[in-house]
Image: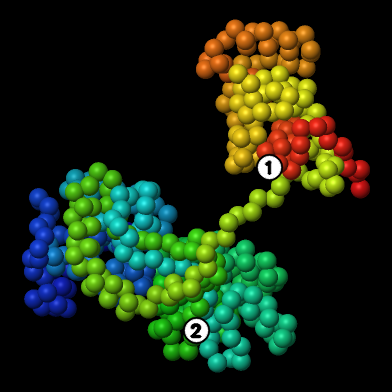
Amino acid sequence: MVARVVSLFLLGLIANIGLVHAGDFKALKGQTAVRVCADAHNLPYSNDKLEGFDNKIAELIAEELGIPVEYYWFPQRIGFSRNTIKKVDPKTGRFLCDVAMSIPAGPGRYLTTKPYFSSIDAMVYRSGEGFELNRISDIAKVKEEQGKELKIGLFDRATATEELLANGLTDQIEYYQFMAGDARVYPGRIVEDELAQGKVDVAFLWGPIASYYANHSDVPMTVVPLNELSEKYIFSFALGVRKQDKAWRDLLDNIMEARKDDIAAIIAEYKLPSLANVEPAKEKVRKAPYTIVDGKVDNKTYVGWRLFNSTCFVCHGSNATGTDVAPNLLISLKDMSSRAFRQKILGRYFATVNLDDPDRRMAFLEEVAEIDAAEFKMPTWDDEPNIRAHIGDLYAYLKARSDGALGEARPERLEEQ
């Protein structure tokens, strides 16, 4: 797409005569404008008619610095930073723009300011059609109680997808492509067109976009924040600059802090979904890698016991509680995942030894006894096919011991069903 640079000297004067004036801050040396990287078709954030809240916040920043706003327009999608804030104009030798707005706060492609808004995904449906939706599961209830299958509009990779599938709604979903080939095809179309015209009955999308298009529709709509997804799905956004531009980032942070009440008022105009009563993040419960019934273990855990007692006990001790040369595995595995255990066993160590033979084991122990423990490296099992295939079994046994679910004695094996 051919992006274009738009100067807002005249537009700013026409829309807000007398608005631009020097505030309590000074522009950086050589800075003649607040040069913003933005999407020309991305409401409620920005558009080329300057109707988005980021357009208004950019004007506020310019007001404080006493300089105008200039835009470099480019679609907010893959390649945005590469084609805007990090791209140099070959004619001028300058970057095309200096600040991107509504950028995910925190480490990433940009150096970011403190966040200036947060939101969560939302569910939108047409009001007054004989049903009420407060949670995703209510869609299934409408089918059960009223016999009505609500058609669901959903962008690919939406955060609500897993919950929708868990509620048995697979056949009711109509998937939409989030990034269409035409940059003018905006995400809000799923509400403004598909939902308003009855092509779908309920839509799921990012909260600010959901609220904006629902509130601007001629068709009455209800917006429900997906606070049931938990606070884990609240995302915060900030201004982003190039990582080397720390002075510019700090200046923006100071302006945003000084005008935080004005910024909050601007954001409030766009009626972002409420974040009240967001459910706390659910602690992920890992399924135990072992099965123990009446003190008897599954085959996997039994094989792990046998492997440990034919190989690993040599250094870690017969009870896995450690020796002078190897750590206590019951402590090490307290919070270790199966994946981390596998990576550690296969990738971290580099002395290769075959310990299947008793004489080799004794010779190995004698050799270890002569090596300073700090310098000793455990054998890698990367090239041991008999061990490599059973690392998951070994993890199951040691995790059962670490969790206190299994004692030191030789376990009995459950009968295969």
Please identify the quadrant where the N terminus is shown.
Answer: bottom left
What residue is pinned by disc 1? 403
Q: Nearer the viewer, residue 261 or 62?
A: 261
Residue lying at 11% horizontally and 60% vertically, measured from the top left: 25
Q: Is residue 299 above or below residue 34?
A: above
Callout 1 crowding tier (Cα within 10 Å): few <14, some 14–19, many ≥20: some
| Numbered disc in front, either 2 or 1 | 1
Q: Nearer the viewer, residue 255 or 35?
A: 255
Amino acid found under the numbered disc labelled 1: Asp
Callout 2 crowding tier (Cα within 10 Å): few <14, some 14–19, many ≥20: some
Residue lying at 33% horizontally and 50% vertically, measured from the top left: 110
- Is residue 403 left or right of 78 when viewed as pictured? right
Rendering coords of residue 167 (x, y %): 68, 70
Residue lying at 45% horizontally and 81% vertically, measured from the top left: 214
- Say if mark 2 contacts mark 1, CB within 8 Å: no
Amino acid found under the numbered disc labelled 2: Thr
Rendering coords of residue 398 (x, y %): 70, 35
| Residue 314 can be seen, yes or no | yes
- Is residue 372 left or right of 89 when viewed as pictured? right
Sooner in the amino-acid sequence: mark 2 or mark 1: 2
Q: Which label is found at residue 222?
A: 2
Q: Is residue 97 above or below residue 346?
A: below
Q: How is the image coloured?
A: rainbow
- SS for dot 1: loop
- SS for dot 2: strand
Q: Quadrant of residue 244?
A: top left
Q: Nearer the viewer, residue 291 or 31?
A: 291
Alpha carbon separation for disc pair 2 and 1: 48 Å
